Image (cartoon, rainbow, N blue to C red):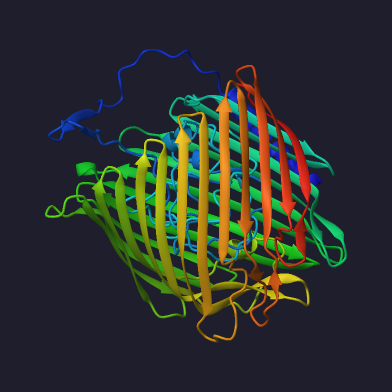
Amino acid sequence: MVKRMVFVLVALFILSLSNLVGAEEPAKEKPLPTELPIVVVKGTDRSYLEVMRTRTLSFMPIRGEKSMIDYFLQVTLGKKTYSHFLSFPGLERRVEERVKERLPSAEGFIEGFMEERREISPIVLLEPRLSRLSVSYTPARYITTRVKALSLMTIRGEKSLTEAFVQFPPRERAYRPLSKEESPLPYLYISASLAADDNFNYRLDYGRKKDKMIHFLSLGRYSAPQWITYEKDGSALGKDEDWLNTRFIWDFGQNKNALLSINGYQKKMDLPEEKERKKDKVGLAGELTFKLQGDNIFKITGWAQSTEVEEDGVSYQDFNPGAQLELEIPQVPLNVGIRAENSSYADKSQFHLWIKDEAIVFKIIKGLSLGLEVGIKKIEGVASEVLPHIKLTEQFNPKLRLQVEAEREFYLPEFDDLYLSRDYIDVNEELDKMVKLWNYEAQLKYELSSVADLSLGGFYNRGEDIIWNWDSANSLARPEIRNMSSWGAKLDLLLHVGETLEQGISYTYQKAENLDDPGKVIPHYPQNMFDIWLIWNTGGWKINMGAEFIDRRYYEEDIDDEIPDGWKHRFEISRMIGENLEFFIEVLLNNNYYLWKDYKPSAQKLYFGLRGKLY
């Protein structure tokens, strides 16, 4: 209780401190800080436009991204979802380079509040993952994750081959800004909802600009005293989560800017047999960006993160500092960097050197481009690995695009990625192997018409990867590394009618095999997954409904017993009250869906809530 009070008081202090600095002066007409873009008409039918923008110094997202802490730092918060509902266990594979957090740009933060049409997301590779708290903004009316599909080459550390699949796209518990325009600074958004059994959650977001500094503050809480039922003894298990993130961005002119971020997260949850587990995390990150001659950009990034998991007086801790240097040469374009970090829990350091060209164009083949990266990574006590990454894109015409991608992954399983983001898991102190994977993916995207998009793709993975094996003795999942392969296909169909109606259907088939012992299964890899959703918005009314299906899953590699298949459903209706307040009712239904074996969410939940823009 004391920690919680301190947590809130610190947030309020930071909020009030920034307000004391002084009020914003009325906006005045000023010359444009940059030149306007030049639009060039191309093509024999004059139907193609090329926009040539002046080069500016961006507010630089950090290379890489942590898997769990979506609610801490994101480049564009608008592409994430404020979600507390349960997602299917198991379905996200981690990309090799993820920094403790991705520092958001000022531009990206503001863009997060803009309307944006949802795109079909890339193919995803699946692995066991429990429900993931994702509590950042969704921009506008869509409460699904929008991923910029088929880009030439994503920033290192983004999930390119391995976009999070299930959360299918996540559409649960969304906090959507109410304005269709950009949210100007300053702003203050708040959202809160209540349900039976003392369920409560809230979210507050504040942003302000003073002279050359921009300040963002985000904090929230999720409390569910009867979050899930443990069916072995019928007990109700609860959890409480609190988070706070504050960041400061300084613009020192055209040639330099800086960013500082501080975040905190804590969780308290019940375990079977009246046990309790606590998780805490504190992170600090900063970045300096310099614009050099020839529009070249040099970045210096540093971070430190402390994570702790405590249960029955036993504490597991990890301290993870790191640093990175990066040079971008836009005219080539070329990216060169070096990165070093250490994990106190694993007692290992790792070093990574890379060089990358994001857009190699072949003049002899129209529409063909290549993204190429080569890296060398060294982990203490393990031989170095060469890490190639190639992405080939063919734009046949404005409506049809094909992308083929291959990537080598080599990384040390990280403490917070394993144990902070997942619930009802056991810490494996003997997990000392590295993840070594080859990932392959192909995706064909076609715009059927102005109101329909179709995407078809396939994937194949092979190598040593993390599985989540069930431990029947303590009824918890345990991370282990196995030599395995998985392959499958994904089909997406998206229909949209302006800003009024959107409907989507997504189906994924996959198969996983144990290469060390074909007689054993790969637990928590469902073979069939299906998702359908509908979003309707008119006259101040909004309806958002959907259903997700997950096939039967093995839960232990040595036995053929399965977790049964199940559905979960969601229905939300909301109504605008004036211009800045929205009232919503949300119903969550569970039809035989299990998070893990013996862990079953409530059959139904009814939420009442408000979302509002105070200013």
Image vertical order of residue 478 relative to residue 256, above or below: below
**Residue shown at the point (70%, 68%) measured from the top left:** 563
Residue 227 makes an appearance in the image: yes
Q: Quadrant of residue 472?
A: bottom right
Image vertical order of residue 614 relative to residue 130, above or below: above
Quadrant where the C terminus sits is top right
Foreground of the two, 503 or 177: 503
Residue 426 makes an appearance in the image: no
Numbered marks: total = 0
Image vertical order of residue 539 relative to residue 385, above or below: above
Q: Position of residue 397 (x, y in %)?
A: 24, 45
Foreground of the two, 17 or 26: 26
Foreground of the two, 455 or 201: 455
Q: Position of residue 548 (x, y in %)?
A: 62, 52
**Residue shown at the point (15%, 32%) measured from the top left:** 45
**Residue shown at the point (73%, 47%) measured from the top left:** 589
Q: Position of residue 390 (x, y in %)?
A: 30, 63
**Residue shown at the point (51%, 52%) measured from the top left:** 506
Could you tell whether 446 is left or right of 596 in the image?
left
Q: Position of residue 537 (x, y in %)?
A: 56, 28
Could you tell whether 66 is left or right of 119 in the image?
right
